[in-house]
Image (cartoon, rainbow, N blue to C red):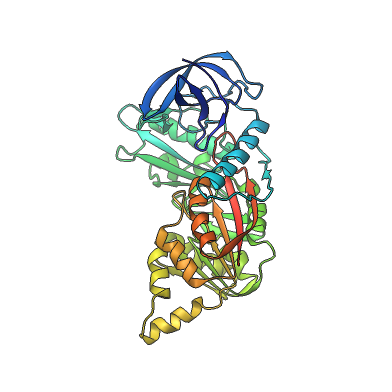
Amino acid sequence: MEVTIERILPGGLGLAHADGQTVMVALAAPGDRLRVRVDRVKGTVAFASIDQIISPSEARVEPPCPYFGRCGGCDFQQLKYEAQIAAKVEIIKDCLRRIGGIESIPEFQITPAPNQWHYRARAQWQYDSVRKRLGYFESGSRRVCDVAECAVLVPALQRTLEDLREQMRDDLLPDEARYFRAILGDGGVAIAPSLSSPTVRQGSPGSLQAEMVTEITRTIHGDTYHLNAESFFQTNTDLLSQLIDAALGEATGKRAVELYCGVGLFTLPLARRFKDVIGIEDDPAAADFARRNLSNADLMSARIEKADVGQWLEMMTAPSAQKEKRRRAAALQNVDFLLLDPPRTGAESRVISGILNVQPERICYVSCDPATLARDLKKLLAGGYTLDSLTAFDMFPQTHHVETVVRLIRS
């Protein structure tokens, strides 16, 4: 089947039409003329792979990574960087219109990454102890693509990957491990699960092994954060200061609430602007790190509650005659600012309902998935909020992923 790619869809696939079918093509570029093979069909939609590039798009470049097309990590390496940015703008607009029902989308731009390569300061490598493979899952499968060099890793994590591969060859990695997570800090690299082999414990001064630590610190926007390799933290630290500025804007006031606060990336700057801040985090370790980070910064105006976000909102906003619940619920009265940075799956329906019950004056929604963002915005806009501003950051060059920051005001 021969097709011409019209545009890039949310999810990173190229859109084409042929023989009465909608065809979605992996690893395509807008304007490509391709011969494709259909891998599967779902209704009137065919999912296809490229057999031959008949006429390449002007936006197409030769992917530099030898694992491109097999590794499931980077799916935009075939695009010039300017084309990647343009595709992400259209992905955001498409989701807001089609899923969110938003016709009047504010003009916005994507802040490009300072480093298009070697930016990733956090990674998870899959480990196949039987076949002795270490890398990332292959596209669309649970097979491990054995990766010796990753073009998007910061140099310190590339050295960590090489060190782990050397230990794999020497049979020093634990067979029960299924993955290794690594994160770069100001003074070393933390790995999970932690390794206890003599080569790691007794690394000579200056060696990579000597740099491995159980937890790290990251200094962002003048604040220092303690965390470990299991903690969620943005993978591209180059843009974090700008991300924080965009999320908070000029927000100040008496009371702020942060949902899914993690180790406190936004909580610390919020605590410098508001008299009372509550951060909600479900993961016990992340909540402990957030409390510690606030304490180390001497920010006593903020407190962290370890709780499921949806359950916490339901408990705090449900009518109750109990004195303690009434007292705690009073903390959610007259909220000036509410920030949420949920996982890729977005906020649960009960979380959105809880936010609408709280009725904060302003909301900031930080999202890494335009589709779930649009789904949740539709409910918030229907609940009495107006879209105030929209901005985006290319936190994930060479992939279709994009970070979006939306600010809302109560109508």
Query: Residue placed farthest to the front in the image?
Result: 20
- Taking the spot 54% from the left edge, 25% from the top edge, the residue there is 28
Q: Is residue 145 in view?
A: yes
Q: Position of residue 232 (x, y in %)?
A: 48, 52
- Frontmost residue, 319 versus 176: 319
- Frontmost residue, 344 versus 279: 344
Q: Is residue 384 left or right of 137 when viewed as pictured?
A: right
Against 201, residue 358 (above or below) is below
Q: Position of residue 214 (x, y in %)?
A: 46, 52
Please state the total of marks drawn on the protein image. 0
- Taking the spot 42% from the left edge, 69% from the top edge, the residue there is 313
Against 406, residue 184 (above or below) is above
Q: Position of residue 381 (x, y in %)?
A: 54, 60
Q: Is residue 48 left or right of 387 when viewed as pictured?
A: left
State the quadrant of the C terminus.
bottom right
Q: Is residue 186 in view?
A: no
- Taking the spot 52% from the left edge, 44% from the top edge, the residue there is 98
Q: Where on the picture, by quarter, is residue 41?
A: top left
Against 4, residue 166 (above or below) is below
- Taking the spot 40% from the left edge, 47% from the top edge, the residue there is 194
Q: Position of residue 109 (x, y in %)?
A: 68, 45
